[in-house]
Image: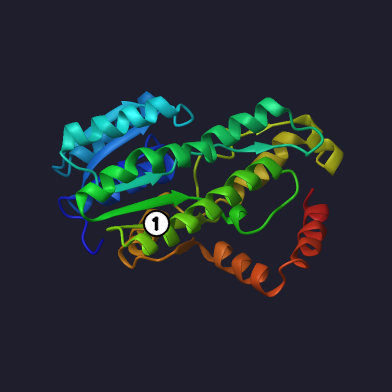
Amino acid sequence: MKSFTDKVAAITGAGSGIGRALALALAKRHCHLALSDVNETGLKETAKQAEAYGVKVTTARVDVSDREAVHAWADQVVKDHGKCNMIFNNAGVAHSASVEGTDYKDFEWIMGINFWGVVHGTKAFLPHLKASGEGHVINISSLFGLISIPAQSTYNASKFAVRGYTESLRQELELSGAPVSATSVHPGGIRTNIARDARVHDSMSSLGVKDLERSRRSFEKMLSMPPEKAAEIILKGVQKNERRILVGNDARLLDLVQRLLPTTYQRLVTTFSRRVM
């Protein structure tokens, strides 16, 4: 995907954050857009801003955990645009709780969006990407798809799953000689609403967190990179056909730590977390 001009990109979670930034960065590059989100207000605003660049933009309210809805959207995208070259499986949510305190319903909720949403998007769009003759699957994992931290077992599980799924997909596409590639993206602290909108369980207190709201605010302070900068890094990585895109110095640093200290890093994280919490 050396050029985005006159290509068609589908983006989930396009109503804000990285999804919106990707949409606008692609629109600047003359790429047509099919945008989805459950946040219809944010989705309309993203579409309005993208249309100012003179590209075709279509929108749909889609819950990515709903398999039939995602498949129907994928078919509609091709009807509306004539083709689809890229799917950015970006929609995601967060949940903070101890393993013991995690309710099964919360676990199913986060996996339904963060992991199954990626699976649905990949499966629904892959035939269309192949038919386009030049396609790319871009799945948004996380820094926490590289390392694990306490109180994020459900989030870690979903993002590690995205990484494994995408890496396997990439290998299969290469083996079959398909005109499609796949990339796993690992953003670090990006300034989005994910922390503010996260579900937080009071079992955090068992891990030493006494003030949940203060803890949330402290975490938000670590989200320093503007989503616009993250989008630029991601698109450059797609053009280079990178297998794994690390977004931010924090992602690059902790990726290195995990490689050098594949098990010992857990002790370091535990020590750091004890001090912070």
Q: Is residue 205 above or below residue 178?
A: above
- Would residue 180 appear left or right of 267 to someone viewing this image? left
- Image quadrant occupied by the N terminus: bottom left
Which residue sits at x=66%, y=29%?
A: 106
Which residue sits at x=24%, y=34%?
A: 77
Q: Nearer the viewer, residue 273 or 8?
A: 8
Number of callouts: 1
Q: Position of residue 271 (x, y in %)?
A: 82, 60
Q: Nearer the viewer, residue 119 or 211?
A: 119
Task: Kindly identify which residue carries mark 1.
Answer: 182
- Would residue 170 appear left or right of 77 to someone viewing this image? right
Which residue sits at x=78%, y=39%?
A: 99
**Does residue 261 appear in this view?**
yes
Q: Nearer the viewer, residue 109 or 71?
A: 71
**Does residue 62 appear in this view?**
no
Q: Position of residue 222 (x, y in %)?
A: 60, 52
For residue 115, which quarter of the picture? top right
Q: Position of residue 259 (x, y in %)?
A: 64, 71
For residue 46, which quarter of the picture? top left
- Would residue 269 appear left or right of 125 to someone viewing this image? right
Q: Nearer the viewer, residue 233 or 238?
A: 238
